[in-house]
Image: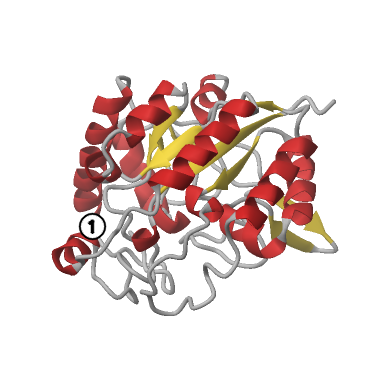
């Protein structure tokens, strides 16, 4: 039996939150506020697959960490409450899911003061519904800079889970040369490992093979790379120590989303029942692994 632990995490966002639609330098709409100022059609494609995912987790006895976009608390009545009722942890995924660093240059798109203002607003919305302090954060689109982690520490967050050190992409402003898949303390102003501090980074799982580091965490990668690679990466990462997997309810959605967006024409090509089967296959492969929310994993560290 594998004795290391896994945190299964869920990003709660809807189809219009992805950067091709809102909140990025190349999106159709500058942000979700602009989107809602002109959008007159149906927008909620999240509630149904979120309920299905909650039922799946409950059937497998899994307590997860849900990274929730702050405005979801206002636009999806009852959704955050249902997550809380299921015994899951609520963590913060930004206020509107907008990018905080440029996807190409990795330079900041807002200053630390504005980042802290928006993040505190999101945490307040979520904490009210969670009825307990929100101590975890994941950057929207996993685009994270070291300066953001410094801000999170100032705000009192206990952990971040945004970093994926792999051979295919780097969504951070650091080289990540010293980052593996186990929890670590990032050095001030960056994301390379440093000395102990008040905030911990929980990086994503990966599969090291033939000199390559293949990312093995995330619904999009499950959709495009399949369950086999994900499971191999998770099992290998578990041998190193605690690791993280994440998924979106939208990955399991069976409905077709509105055809809005720039630069990602095939992003939702694979989703729905096929991805649900893949996710179930991963849960079966990991049935002997103890899954714990990130809050519990953080409490086990100094």
- In the rendered image, the vertical position of residue 88 relative to residue 262, given as above or below: above
- In the rendered image, the vertical position of residue 167 relative to residue 264, given as above or below: above
Query: Would residue 198 be seen by someone viewing this image from the given angle?
Result: no
| Image label count | 1
Number of residues whose C-alpha sits closer than 10 Å to that of mark 1, classed few (under 14), some (14–19) or many (20 or more): few
Residue 109, located in which quarter of the rendered image? bottom left
At a point 77% along the width and 64% down the height, the residue shown is 212
Say which of 254 and 279 sits in front.
254
- Left or right of residue 170, residue 283 in this image: right
Say which of 108 and 194 sits in front.
108
Q: At which x and y percent is residue 297? A: 56, 25
Residue 269, located in which quarter of the rendered image? bottom right
Q: At which x and y percent is residue 167? A: 67, 65
At a point 62% along the width and 54% down the height, the residue shown is 273
Residue to which mark 1 is pinned:
111
- Left or right of residue 51, residue 128 in this image: left
Q: At which x and y percent is residue 138? A: 43, 45
Q: At which x and y percent is residue 215? A: 67, 57
Query: Would residue 30 be seen by someone viewing this image from the given angle?
Result: yes
At a point 64% along the width and 67% down the height, the residue shown is 168
At a point 40% along the width and 35% down the height, the residue shown is 91
Say which of 183 and 63 sits in front.
63
Q: Residue furthest left?
A: 37
Quadrant assignment for the N terminus: top right
- In the rendered image, the vertical position of residue 32 relative to residue 118, given as above or below: below
- Left or right of residue 104, residue 37 in this image: left
Task: Tell me which colouring the rendered structure shows.
Answer: secondary structure
Determine whether the residue tagged by mark 1 lies in a helix, strand or loop.
loop
């Amino acid at each position: 039996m594998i004795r290391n632990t896994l945190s299964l995490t869920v990003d709660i966002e809807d189809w219009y939150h992805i950067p091709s639609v809102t909140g990025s330098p190349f999106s159709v709409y500058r942000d979700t506020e602009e989107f809602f100022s002109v959008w007159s059609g149906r927008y909620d494609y999240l509630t149904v697959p979120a309920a299905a995912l909650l039922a799946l987790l409950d059937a497998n006895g899994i307590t997860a960490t849900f990274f929730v976009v702050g405005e979801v608390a206002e636009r999806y009545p009852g959704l955050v409450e249902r997550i809380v009722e299921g015994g899951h942890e609520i963590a913060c995924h930004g206020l509107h899911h907008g990018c905080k660093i440029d996807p190409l240059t990795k330079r900041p798109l807002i200053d630390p003061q504005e980042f802290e203002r928006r993040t505190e607003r999101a945490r307040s919305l979520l904490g009210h519904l969670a009825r307990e302090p929100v101590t975890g954060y994941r950057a929207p689109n996993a685009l994270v800079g070291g300066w953001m982690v410094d801000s999170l520490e100032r705000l009192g967050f206990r952990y971040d889970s945004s970093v994926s050190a792999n051979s295919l992409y780097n969504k951070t402003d650091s080289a990540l040369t010293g980052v593996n898949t186990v929890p670590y303390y990032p050095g001030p102003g960056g994301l390379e490992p440093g000395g102990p501090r008040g905030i911990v980074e929980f990086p994503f799982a990966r599969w090291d093979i033939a000199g390559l580091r293949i990312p093995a965490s995330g619904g999009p990668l499950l959709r495009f790379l399949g369950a086999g690679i994900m499971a191999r990466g998770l099992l290998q990462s578990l041998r190193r120590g605690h690791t993280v997997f994440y998924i979106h309810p939208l990955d399991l959605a069976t409905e077709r989303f509105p055809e809005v967006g720039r630069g990602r024409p095939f992003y939702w090509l694979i989703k729905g029942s096929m991805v649900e089967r893949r996710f179930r296959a991963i849960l079966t492969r990991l049935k002997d692994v103890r899954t714990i929310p990130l809050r519990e994993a953080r409490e086990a560290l100094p």
